Amino acid sequence: MESSVERPAVSIVFGTDDTTPVSDHVVAWLREQGHSVTVLANPADWPEVGRRVGEAVASGAADVGVVCCWTGTGVSIAANKVPGVRAALCTDAETARGARRWNDANVLALGLRLTSAPLAEEMLSAFLGTAVDDGEGAMITRVEPGPAPAGRAGFDPALDHLVYAAPDLDAAVQDLAERCGVQPVEGGRHVGLGTRNHLLGLGGGAYLEIIGPDPEQPEPAGPRPFGIDSLTGPALVTWAVRPADLDAVVARARARGHDPGDARPMSRRTPAGDVLRWRLTASALDDGREPVSGVGSGFGDGLLPFLIDWGTTVHPTASGLPEIGLVSLTGRHPDVAGVRRALAALDVRLDVEGGERPGLTAVLRRADGVLVTLARG
């Protein structure tokens, strides 16, 4: 079939590890064609350029990505490490056209060493003006990975769960069920805190907690956890890691200058009437503002996880939760260095970049391959 089309303006994220006349020309030319182009701020090394462009495309923040480095090889490798990305390193227009037509490539990689401005225009025109052949869908699906287990996409392998808080729990659960294509199950009530939750598995022994006010409980004596009382809509507020020895991690973190707080007992009553018990840390560090969450997010605005120890309690994922795959978990914060130091003190890993508004972003993948983004800020 004929695969050349008049493609409407699209949103493009552009990244390069080196600013050159050719890279500047690419951005200017794309904008002249009417496309919306976002250029990554603060050019960094090629692994970060490729990853950040790939994550923007995979999350749906951009339709297409364009990445550059001296040879184009490094950025294409880095971008292809992001699930859902199909980056193609091209050196001529026909290769770019074929990458779209037969491979549904969504990121174009260019080498600054050999690519001239006119050649870049030819490749971009071919790439953006070519549709995918209808008969290639099955082939493309075969190269897509399954849901990424925890720890594979820039976050800590000891991830226990993500916390998605909402002022209206039922509405948030219904919205997630529609967006994720799977129904969260009821977890239970946090007696005395005025909250209840629903759960979705994320694979790899991790899960998503959706938490909100419980109208069947009396008003709690203090504020509900995770800043629920001040939320105006659902938000990914923080995350938890499950270390092998919680108390040892707390002691080491304090010795390194970060205090995650003392571990305190918690519990939840399931719909069947069983009581689950665990311990978690409450942050002793507060930067002077009201903490975003009641469990470990004061400094760091939710980017610093709280620590959890389930003890002898059966982990929530052992019950066979309905699942959606977790692709990536990333954070942004104006004090990147400070957050990274605190993460290092806790011996946990999270990809963090600079940003005026702190926040976490999780990208999930449905069974049909559709990506779902949860964020805050």
Image (cartoon, rainbow, N blue to C red):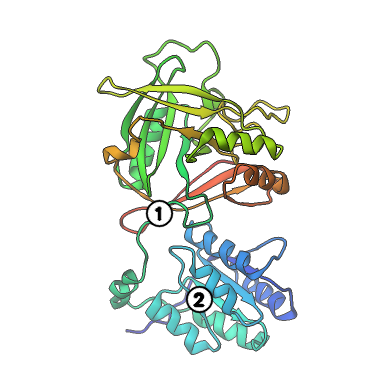
The residue located at (40%, 54%) in the rendering is 149
Query: Which residue corresponds to mark 2?
Result: 128
Res 137 visible: yes
Above or below: residue 76 compared with residue 202: below
- Quadrant where the N terminus is found in the figure: bottom left
Above or below: residue 139 compared with residue 36: below
Judge the density around disc 1: few (<14), some (14-19), many (≥20) Cα neighbours within 10 Å: some
Query: Which residue corresponds to mark 1?
Result: 149
Res 37 visible: no
Local SS, label 1: loop
Q: Position of residue 254 (x, y in %)?
A: 67, 34
The residue located at (58%, 27%) in the rendering is 282
Could you tell me how far apart the alpha carbons at marks 2 and 1 are, in whole angstroms? 33 Å
Name the residue type under label 1.
Answer: Pro
The residue located at (37%, 80%) in the rendering is 102
Q: Nearer the viewer, residue 357 or 185?
A: 185
Name the residue type under label 2.
Answer: Leu
